Image (spheres, rainbow, N blue to C red):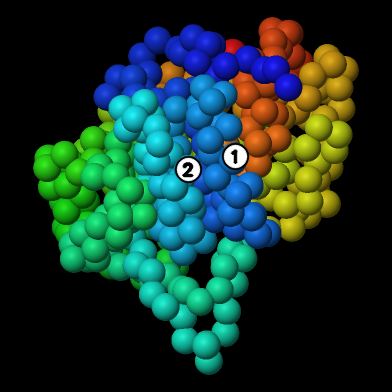
């Protein structure tokens, strides 16, 4: 199958934060699916997906220890082993440590089809250093371009959030900054699913980058509006992850059954169907619009798309390069499916 190379990407908006954006392609490989997210992926298929992504021009690969309890990182390390390190970039995350699971304990309900391991939150300086050391070993490298603090915020930690936020500001982020100064990572930031914690951290500690999953997408922008404005003002690059909102806008023919990592309710699916109906009128797929949309914002440096197979890689690359009619965006605005002042391609 022939397809466009991801190297010939659409131009970026002026003003995208330079520190991170110059290292990132518009389309990045999201490594959660090859960590057996929701379903197992055969080892050979996972390695083939990564290698096919590189051959297709994708040059940034994102992962985390949590993704399959180290499986995603190990598979990335193995798949990229024969490629010169300067020819690709990596991001991984800290904030959890991996432990062997006790057979007497119930299996974690976290979506990863992996047994024998569990993850515990650890935001201490020692925990950060241990996490990075383990990640580098699994990735078979001595550095990563981007290091992200994973899953902080009230939605994750509830009543414990204020105490964790204090530890993050006093201990965790300073430890990550030390690693940056030592060259273990090139940039530091947050990897989260909510804007509120970003707005709390940004005035208190200088960040290079934020990976925001599912909040700045074709389907929704309001729960990221303040963050996106602050990111531009503070020169913080945004990695827009989860462009399909957990699969809601990923299929070609109809809305998916999941949203925000959970079953989508009837109202959500009905709203998603309106995107499908309108895009069908223009002869384009919703997934194509969803993948290209975030890049129009001046804060966005890359779109991180979770990929589990070579076929999904081909689909993402094709979608990134499929021309979209400019009138599509106006029609989405007129239908109330895009916020009025949202930048569009």
Q: Earlier in the sequence, mark 2 or mark 1?
A: 1
Q: Residue furthest front?
A: 82
Left or right: residue 338 compared with residue 284: left
Q: Residue 49 — which label?
A: 1
- Res. 127 image quadrant: bottom left
Vertical relation: 3 (above or below) 269? above
- Res. 344 image quadrant: top right
x%, y% of residue 96? Answer: 36, 64
Out of 239 and 40, give the one closest to the viewer.
40
Element type at mark 1: helix
Element type at mark 2: helix
Which residue is found at the position 70% from the left and 29% from the top?
315
Residues marked 2 and 1 touching at CB (< 8 Å): yes
Alpha carbon of mark 2 to alpha carbon of mark 1: how far?
9 Å
Question: Residue tagged by mark 2?
Answer: 79
Which residue is found at the position 41% from the left and 47% from the top?
77
Q: Is residue 54 visible?
A: yes
- Res. 42 image quadrant: bottom right
Out of 223 and 312, give the one closest to the viewer.
312
Out of 259 and 66, give the one closest to the viewer.
66
Quadrant the C terminus occupies:
top right
Left or right: residue 104 compared with residue 184: right
Vertical relation: 262 (above or below) 305? below
Q: Is residue 233 visible?
A: no
Which residue is found at the position 23% from the left and 35% from the top?
186
Q: Residues within 10 Å of mark 1 (few under 14, many from 20)?
A: many
Quadrant the N terminus occupies:
top right
């Amino acid at each position: 199958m022939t397809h466009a190379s991801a190297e010939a990407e659409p131009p970026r908006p002026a003003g995208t934060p330079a520190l991170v954006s110059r290292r990132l392609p518009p389309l990045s490989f999201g490594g959660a699916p090859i960590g057996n997210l929701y379903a197992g992926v055969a080892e050979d298929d996972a390695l083939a997906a990564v290698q096919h992504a590189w051959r297709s021009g994708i040059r940034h690969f994102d992962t985390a220890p949590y993704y399959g309890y180290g499986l995603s990182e190990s598979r990335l390390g193995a798949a990229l082993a024969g490629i010169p390190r300067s020819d690709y970039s990596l991001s991984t995350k800290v904030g959890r440590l991996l432990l062997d699971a006790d057979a007497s304990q119930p299996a974690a309900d976290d979506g990863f089809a992996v047994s024998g391991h569990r993850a515990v939150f650890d935001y201490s300086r020692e925990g950060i250093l241990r996490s990075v050391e383990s990640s580098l070993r699994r990735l078979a490298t001595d550095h990563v371009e981007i290091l992200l603090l994973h899953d902080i915020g009230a939605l994750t930690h509830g009543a414990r959030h204020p105490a964790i936020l204090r530890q993050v500001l006093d201990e965790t982020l300073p430890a990550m900054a030390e690693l940056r100064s030592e060259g273990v990572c090139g940039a530091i930031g947050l990897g989260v699913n909510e804007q509120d914690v970003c707005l709390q951290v940004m005035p208190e500690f200088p960040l290079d980058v934020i990976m925001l999953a599912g909040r700045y997408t074709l389907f929704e922008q309001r729960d990221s509006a303040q963050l996106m404005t602050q990111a531009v003002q503070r020169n913080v690059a945004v990695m827009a992850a989860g462009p399909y909102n957990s699969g809601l806008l990923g299929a070609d023919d109809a809305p998916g059954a999941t949203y925000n990592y959970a079953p989508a309710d009837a109202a959500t699916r009905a709203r998603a169907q309106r995107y499908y109906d309108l895009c069908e009128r223009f002869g384009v797929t919703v997934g194509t619009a969803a993948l290209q949309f975030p890049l129009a914002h001046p804060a966005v440096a890359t779109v991180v798309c979770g990929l589990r197979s070579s076929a999904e890689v081909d689909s993402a690359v094709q979608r990134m390069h499929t021309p979209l009619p400019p009138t599509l965006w106006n029609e989405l605005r007129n239908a109330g499916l895009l916020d009025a002042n949202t930048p569009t391609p």
